Amino acid sequence: MFILEKPYVSDLLKNTLTELKANVLDNETARTAMQDSPLSLVNEQDFINFYKANPDQPVYSNSENAINWIDNNLTSGDLSQKIRLFKDKAAFRDLVKDLYPDFFYKTVPFEELDSINPEDLPIPCVIKPSVGFFSLGVHIVESIQGWHDAVTAIKEEIEHIKTMYPAKVLELDMFIIEQCIEGEEFAVDAYFDKEGKPVILDILGHLFASSDDVSDRVYITSTDIIKKWHDKFEGLLTEIGKRAGLKNFPLHIEIRGYEKGNLGVIEVNPMRFAGWCVTDLAYFAYGINPYKYFMEGLTPDWDEIFAKNKDKVCAMTIGEIDSNVDRSKIKDINYESFNSYFTKPLELRKIDYKEFPVFAFMFAEVKKDNMAELKKILHADLSEYLIFE
């Protein structure tokens, strides 16, 4: 069962739904996305009845914008409760508290942020919405003054953020303060099968421009990354799955890993893989169709994948628009120039920059011994691709 919602439905997802003759909820987003498909959409009541008849069946949404509809309509099973467990970062911290007994976290209502004494915090630390998405409202605090700067920035950002995403995706009345987790950062797309076993579909390394960078500009995947981290992450997912009772459940989990093997969970995003259909990177890199694998309970043959893809790195780059740019003054985007920056572009996705502070998602391939292309764009001023009136 699939629920399509904004902000983005990829061609891979559309084609997969048609191929699988999937049960897709009839809503405005689905009608627009599937208008050229022969697939018949399922009306709301029939969709609810299908779920009610088998509440353990796989349910997937490409976007957390579907959470509100699920809360109000798919009430016969425990899907809504499991989603809430992971969407609420504080509830998840409570779930795994004994795994990280020395980890500091504290929830604070938005209106009480000014009352926090930063000298009582384990600086460096992170402050972010307790329920959040896409690094929105996230700030790294590296000093006492940095705390005051972060609170000021959050106040300025909130009204703008509210216009972009539904309340269920970002709940800005409560924030969580956490100590910084050291190590390399990864994003993992995985699902729990009908027996509750985790199946990893891709591991993405998150590249940063600096220590205080919290953007999502560049992610990469390679067989070297997966070989190194797969078994460690699978063990962590197994523990989380047992505690939460997960079966037929997809998720996107962000983890920091040390060389010595210690793992720290940043957050878990339920009901979906990487947002904005960025999970399609697994398809471009390894031929893994994450939607099909989840719905049909398939497991990647990693040995075969390793043999075929040992010399390449696949990346996803977001064409961000800086918050200081007045998007109403943008006349057009030089997509040809943005595309030509990459040596081997795989797919360029144009995004409506009038609605979102993003003009494109780019999937590209690079040689693993030549990462300069990606490192350079981490520091690039992407406004050079914007054409103003």
Image (tube, grey):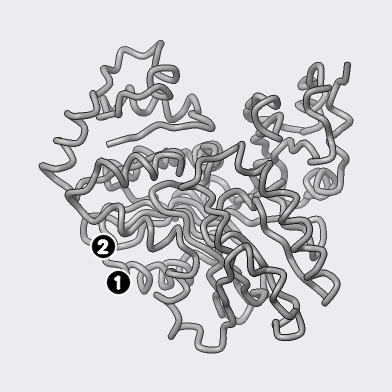
Name the residue rendered at 40%, 22% in the picture.
Answer: 28
Q: Quadrant of the N terminus?
A: top left
Most distant residue in the left direction:
53
Task: Say which element carries label 2.
Answer: loop
Q: Residues within 10 Å of mark 1 (few under 14, many from 20)?
A: few
Examine the rendered structure and indicate whether residue 314 appears above or below residue 306: above
- Residue highlighted by disc 1: 242
Name the residue rendered at 52%, 53% in the picture.
Answer: 171
The image quadrant of residue 92 is: bottom left
Between 170 and 238, the residue placed more toward the observer is 170
Q: In the image, residue 193 lies at what x, y percent?
A: 27, 55
Between 299 and 245, the residue placed more toward the observer is 245
Most distant residue in the bottom direction:
102
Examine the rendered structure and indicate whether residue 104 appears above or below residue 156: below
Name the residue rendered at 49%, 31% in the picture.
Answer: 6
- Specify which label sits upstream in the sequence, 1 or 2: 2
Task: Say which element carries label 1.
Answer: helix
Name the residue rendered at 34%, 51% in the picture.
Answer: 299
Q: Quadrant of the C terminus?
A: top right
- Residue highlighted by disc 2: 196
The tally of labels here is 2
Labels 1 & 2 near each other (Cβ < 8 A): yes
Q: In the image, residue 217 lies at what x, y percent?
A: 71, 46
The image quadrant of residue 195 is: bottom left
- The answer to whether 2 appears left or right of 159 in the picture is left
Q: In the image, residue 83 lies at what x, y percent?
A: 37, 55
The image quadrant of residue 85 is: bottom left
Between 233 and 84, the residue placed more toward the observer is 84
What's the residue type where badge 1 is placed? Lys
